[in-house]
Amino acid sequence: MKKSLIILLIGACMASCTHTYKQTYNVPPSKYIGLEQIGDLCLPDTTHKKALVFCSPYCHGSELRFKEVYNPVLDTLDTNLWRFYFIIVPVGSEDTLDYNKLMQDCSQLGVDTNRAYIWRQQGYREDYNLVFSLFHSTHPLENTIGGVPHAILLDEKNYIANLRECDFDKRDSCWYVPREFGHFDGEIPDDFQTEDTAQFMLVRTTVGTPPIKVVEVE
């Protein structure tokens, strides 16, 4: 019998990371990505699972997540079955960064720079809401993420991997959040449309936390 995942969350899990860049103008326009381009990469592809990895080489949280979770997992996934897209945030919407230096730093992080793009958004919750709205989900998603690092996982039919969370003190209070690579206990399922009811995460909610917007994803 599978065991439940139990994690006690106290306070904020991850703060957004920012970085100031030198003023240079050598970014290929094709390397900037917006909401429409994310949809163009993923929606027509109905033969691969996809991982949208939002990260920054200048965020210590990204360094740790790549070292401890992303790199070990990505090294084991079959590239015939998966497509990986690395979305670098936040860098602003103007061509005012040293692109070559940025790609060097991303490569050291573990990013495949051939599949790396620069996001025009800042990584706020509202920005992730827009990404969620592109795809499907078996349940409405509570938007609990902001900043970096985060990975949004999609199956071949562009359903978002989600995970049921329940309040540690009120077990009947449950909701669904995006499911990360680190949330899987064992093999990643064939699709994200069939819920494994034995898998859930217990969390302890904090008092006075602002309400979280629920995103309806069809």
Image (cartoon, rainbow, N blue to C red):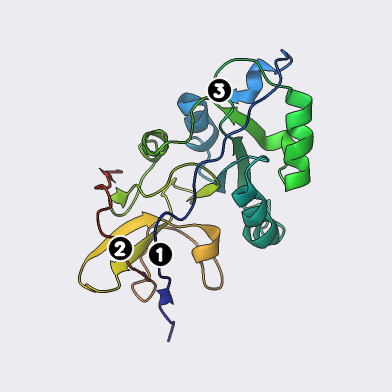
Mark 3 and mark 2: Cα distance apart in space: 33 Å
Q: Is residue 90 above or below residue 147?
A: above
Q: Is residue 135 above or below residue 192?
A: above
Residue closest to the far top: 25
* Residue kind at label 2, given as amino acid type: Thr
**On the image, which quarter does residue 28 sit in?**
top right
**On the image, which quarter does residue 75 sit in?**
bottom right
Percent coordinates x, y for residue 138 in the rendering? 31, 54
Q: Is residue 17 left or right of residue 68?
A: left
* Residue kind at label 1, given as amino acid type: Leu
Where disc 3 sits, the SS reads loop
Q: Quadrant of the C terminus?
A: top left
Task: Count residues near mark 3 (Cα–Cα under 10 Å), then give few for <14, some for 14-19, many for 20+.
Answer: some
Q: Is residue 64 left or right of residue 46?
A: right
Q: Which of 101 and 206 is in front in this view?
A: 206
Question: Mark 3 touching mark 2, by CB under 8 A?
Answer: no
Question: Mark 2 touching mark 1, by CB under 8 A?
Answer: yes
Task: Count residues near mark 1 (Cα–Cα under 10 Å), then give few for <14, some for 14-19, many for 20+.
Answer: few
* Residue that numbered label 3 is attached to: 92
Mark 2 and mark 1: Cα distance apart in space: 7 Å
Task: Count residues near mark 2 (Cα–Cα under 10 Å), then give few for <14, some for 14-19, many for 20+.
Answer: some
Determine which of the numbered discs, if any, sits on residue 9 in the image.
1
* Residue kind at label 3, given as amino acid type: Gly
Percent coordinates x, y for residue 25 in the rendering? 71, 12
Where disc 2 sits, the SS reads loop
Q: Is residue 101 above or below residue 47?
A: above
What residue is drawn where x is 78% and y is 26%? 100
Q: Quadrant of the N terminus?
A: bottom left
What residue is drawn where x is 66% and y is 35%? 116
Q: Which of 57 and 157 is in front in this view?
A: 57
